[in-house]
Image (cartoon, rainbow, N blue to C red):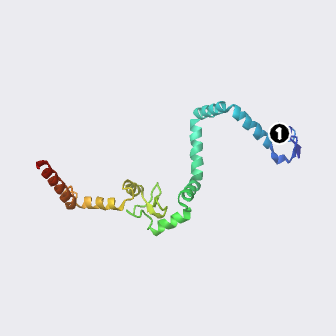
Amino acid sequence: MQRCKKCGEVKRLDEFHLAKGMANGHRSECKECHRARMRAWYAQNRERAIAGVRQWQQENKEHLAAYRREYRKGRQGEAREGHLRRTFGLTQNDYDDLLARQGGGCRICSKRPGKISLHVDHDHETGEIRGLLCVGCNNALGQFHDDAELLLRAIHYLGNALGPLVDELEWDGIVRDRARALVQVSV
């Protein structure tokens, strides 16, 4: 037990930071008082503190980059799990089960995940998960705005790429409109 020099309360030693130079090996102010003092200092010296951090980061780029790489590597699974849970309400096990049910690849083209995992495709209106897609297939659906009619028109276009530019029903409408316009001009 030790009395804090700031607040005067008697507290357990684990409520004081360690300090080698002190007789009992702990600071004279408790962690709570130290935290309050540091917050007050930061509030008054915010720009100075931020500038100091930026300067250290500039002077230690390689060290900082190595630290960040190691940190991300250690948390990769944890970060993936958090993303799946927050965004789609899935666990990694749910994702793995869905991937297995799809045969281990993209639901459209069957491409297997490589360095980049498959994207969770979902209906943007209902939030319902439709499957796992590779980057290419997911982007393609996004470009078509999840519009089935537009996709069918694209399929028809691919099947008739060398055929007429305008389908017959649309062509008939254009011809009728032009004929009406010509009749009105001549009258």
Relative vertical location of residue 102 with respect to residue 138 in this rendering, above or below: below
Pinpoint residue 9: horizontal percent, then vertical percent.
Answer: 87, 43
Q: Nearer the viewer, residue 49 or 115?
A: 49
How crowded pointer 1 is (Cα within 10 Å; few <14, some 14-19, many 20+) is rated as many
Q: Which element type, helix, strand or loop, lies under badge 1?
A: strand
Kindly give the residue lying farthest to the bottom in the view shown: 101
- Viewer can see residue 148: yes
* Residue at image point 66% right, 30% down: 48
Say left or right for 118 vs 8.
Answer: left
Residue closer to the observer: 76 or 48: 48
Query: Residue drawn at (37%, 53%), measured in percent from left and top?
Result: 143
**In this rendering, position of residue 30 left or right of residue 62:** right
Q: Residue at x 81, y 39 (%)?
A: 20
Q: Is residue 150 left or right of residue 89?
A: left
Q: Is residue 163 visible?
A: no
Which quadrant of the structure image shows residue 83?
A: bottom right
Where residue 77 sits: x, y (%)?
A: 57, 56
Q: Residue 169: which quarter of the image?
A: bottom left
Viewer-proximal residue among 1 and 184: 184
Residue occupying image coordinates x 19% and y 57%: 171
Picture coordinates of residue 58 (x, y %)? 58, 33
Q: Which residue is mark 1?
A: 29
In the picture shown, does residue 182 fall above or below 151?
above
User: Which of the pair 80/178 is nearer the observer?
Assistant: 178
Q: Is residue 34 left or right of residue 150?
A: right
The percent coordinates of residue 42 (x first, y second) are: 70, 35
Q: How many marks?
A: 1
Under mark 1, the amino acid is Glu
Furthest residue in direction front, as rendered: 187
